[in-house]
Image (cartoon, helix red, strand yellow):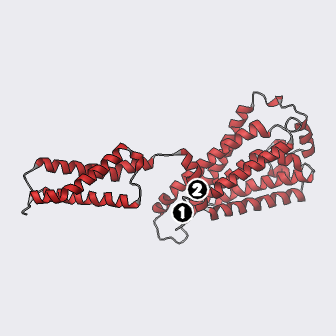
């Protein structure tokens, strides 16, 4: 191929200079980006043109300095497109993840959450009905010994405590609560590998316990104590367990496939990021719930008025609903 090097260089030089100028601006201020879409398109066009010019010069033996300049220019542009930007975008940003990624992930699988909620509510109804029909059913249903006696006796005992009994034990108690609740949530997710069957069992049984306890205390006329005891930490703990169950049903859906003509491995890889996101948020919520239960929920009137505890629980629940329901909507991608 015969190439008029002088004419070729004169025509291409302005484009090389423009590409080099854009690279210098990007390298001096990495967070600046390309600005508008037109800027990114222009950069890509200049990169492709420089690559084509380098290919034309590759067979031309003279002017090695010009070839080296083009090689460096194309390499810098390639790195900017394929490595520097990806590395910058791949950095984990905790606040963005919490306020945007997690709520969007939750809403992408909202149908699974509604199913989890329905299963838990069905368990609540069953537990309440079982205790209504037979008071002795508590001995079978409830796994905690302090819930087996009379609600009135327990309320009297709790209200007569000064709070000093928990002094020095709150940190240990909080850690135990976190470990137990995180374990339940992880089981609800991991049991998705049983096609969701054991996930449903875990959620239903947790609903049975909740329904039995609530009915027992309401029947005994201890509704205010119940709300003041459960709302502060339960407004976070119960939704967190539901979110763990949501992740389990997402996993079960990938395992079953529901008529998708996609290999199992690809289905798993598609849902893995969302599952990791869901269970990561669950762990954070349960740590918060454990702290509240150990350092706040265990104190009752007259040490801590029930109105304060109930108000705290309502505000906590409202904040959770606002976070999951509304955060990240401006940057939300349309559902496929």
Res. 198 in view: no
Left or right: 312 with respect to 96?
Answer: right
How much space separates mark 2 and mark 1, taking CA atoms?
Answer: 25 Å
Left or right: 128 with respect to 121?
Answer: right
In-front residue for pair 281/82: 82
For the point 41% across and 58% down, the residue is 36
In-front residue for pair 39/112: 39
For the point 65% across and 58% down, the residue is 325
Q: Nearer the viewer, mark 2 or mark 1?
A: 2
- In x, y percent, where is residue 72? 22, 48
For the residues labelled 2 and 1, say whether their Cβ atoms are less than 8 Å apart.
Answer: no
Q: Residues within 10 Å of mark 2 (few under 14, many from 20)?
A: many
Q: Which mark is residue 254?
A: 1
Q: Disc 1 on helix, strand or loop?
A: helix
- In x, y percent, where is residue 139? 84, 49
Res. 165 in view: yes
Q: Disc 2 on helix, strand or loop?
A: loop
Left or right: 38 with respect to 334?
Answer: left
Which residue is identified by label 2?
328
For the point 79% across and 40% down, the residue is 297
């Amino acid at each position: 191929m015969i190439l008029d090097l002088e004419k070729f260089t004169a025509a291409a030089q302005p484009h090389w200079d423009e590409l080099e100028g854009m690279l210098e601006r990007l390298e001096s201020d990495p967070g600046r980006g390309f600005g508008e879409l037109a800027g990114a398109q222009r950069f890509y066009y200049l990169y492709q043109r420089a690559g084509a010019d380098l290919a034309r010069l590759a067979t031309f033996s003279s002017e090695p300095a010009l070839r080296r300049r083009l090689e460096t220019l194309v390499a810098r542009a390639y790195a900017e497109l394929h490595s520097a930007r990806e590395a910058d975008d791949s950095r984990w940003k905790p606040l963005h993840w919490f306020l945007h990624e997690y709520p969007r992930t939750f809403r992408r699988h909202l149908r699974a959450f509604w199913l989890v909620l329905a299963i838990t509510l069905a368990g609540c109804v069953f537990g309440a009905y079982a205790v209504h029909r037979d008071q002795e059913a508590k001995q079978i249903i409830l796994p905690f010994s302090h819930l087996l006696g009379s609600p009135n006796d327990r309320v009297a005992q709790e209200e007569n405590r000064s709070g000093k009994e928990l002094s020095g034990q709150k940190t240990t108690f909080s850690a135990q609560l976190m470990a137990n609740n995180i374990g339940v949530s992880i089981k609800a997710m991991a049991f998705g590998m049983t096609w969701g069957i054991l996930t449903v069992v875990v959620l239903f049984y947790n609903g049975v316990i909740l329904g039995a306890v609530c009915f027992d205390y309401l029947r005994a006329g201890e509704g205010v104590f119940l709300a003041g005891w459960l709302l502060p930490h339960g407004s976070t703990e119960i939704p967190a367990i539901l979110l763990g169950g949501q992740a389990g049903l997402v996993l079960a859906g990938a395992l079953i496939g529901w008529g998708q003509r996609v290999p199992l491995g690809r289905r798993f890889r598609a849902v893995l990021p969302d599952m990791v996101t869901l269970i990561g948020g669950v762990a954070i919520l349960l740590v918060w719930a454990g702290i509240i239960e150990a350092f706040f929920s265990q104190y009752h009137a007259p040490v801590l008025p029930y109105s304060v505890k109930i108000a705290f629980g309502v505000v906590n629940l409202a904040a959770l609903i606002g976070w999951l329901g509304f955060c990240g909507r401006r940057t939300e991608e349309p559902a496929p």
